């Protein structure tokens, strides 16, 4: 019975060890040693309780009906194994976490594709020290000076510009 319970919840320690960061290896090894100790102690116990020798008890006790009464009560005693009420909750949380991981992965891949496209755009931009004003305006139209459509005052910084004129009624 103990081996059935343990086999149901066995851990793949090799896969677990691959996911442990280098800085936490010592804590992982301590945890594994403690778990192995618990496993050894469970496996050292017999699968079933040892049978009682009722004949020995009846030979030592003077009252004859007392041992038979105890035997009857012991055989009638059934201790149920606790039912598992938590596993369905854990399974549902694992499914939710798996969905969140999938969503995060797809979102991350979309962001990565966007970043790759942006990097590809930067590959076409020449170095700033080799760029002309026309090339700068072509690659960065929102930052380039536009004296016709957006005239500015020297030194052409946002602080040096006049505030926007209020709209006329």
Image (cartoon, rainbow, N blue to C red):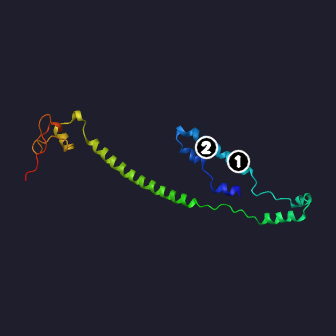
**Residue picked out by circle 2:** 31
Q: Quadrant of residue 156?
A: top left
Give x and y (percent) for residue 146: 13, 42
User: In the image, is residue 141 above or below residue 101?
Assistant: above
Image quadrant where one finds the N terminus: bottom right
Q: In the image, is 165 to the left or to the right of 64?
A: left
Which residue is more in the foreground, 42 or 55?
A: 55
Q: Earlier in the sequence, mark 2 or mark 1?
A: 2
Q: Callout 2: helix, strand or loop? A: helix
Query: With respect to residue 18, does 52 lie above or below?
Result: below
Residue 49 located left or right of residue 110: right
Q: In the rendered image, is residue 157 in sight? A: no
Residue beneath label 1, please?
40
Q: Residues within 10 Å of mark 1 (few under 14, many from 20)?
A: few
Query: How far apart are the two marked residues, 2 and 1, measured between alpha carbons?
Result: 14 Å
Local packing at callout 2 (Cα closer than 10 Å; few below 14, some 14-19, many 20+) is few
Give the residue at x 64% y 46%.
Answer: 35
* Left or right, 91 with reference to 152: right
């Amino acid at each position: 019975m103990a081996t059935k319970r343990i086999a149901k919840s066995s851990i793949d320690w090799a896969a677990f060890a691959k996911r442990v960061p280098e800085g936490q290896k010592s804590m992982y090894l301590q945890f594994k040693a403690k778990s192995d100790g618990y496993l050894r102690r469970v496996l050292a116990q017999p699968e079933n309780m040892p049978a009682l020798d009722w004949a020995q008890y009846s030979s030592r006790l003077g009252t004859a009906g007392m041992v038979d009464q105890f035997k009857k009560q012991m055989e009638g005693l059934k201790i149920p194994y606790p039912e598992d009420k938590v596993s369905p909750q854990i399974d549902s949380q694992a499914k939710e976490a798996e969905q969140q991981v999938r969503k995060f992965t797809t979102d991350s891949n979309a962001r990565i594709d966007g970043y790759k496209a942006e990097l590809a755009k930067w590959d076409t931009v020449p170095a700033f020290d080799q760029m002309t004003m026309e090339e700068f305006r072509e690659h960065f139209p929102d930052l380039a000076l536009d004296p016709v459509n957006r005239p500015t005052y020297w030194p052409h910084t946002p602080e040096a510009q006049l505030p926007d004129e209020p709209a006329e009624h």
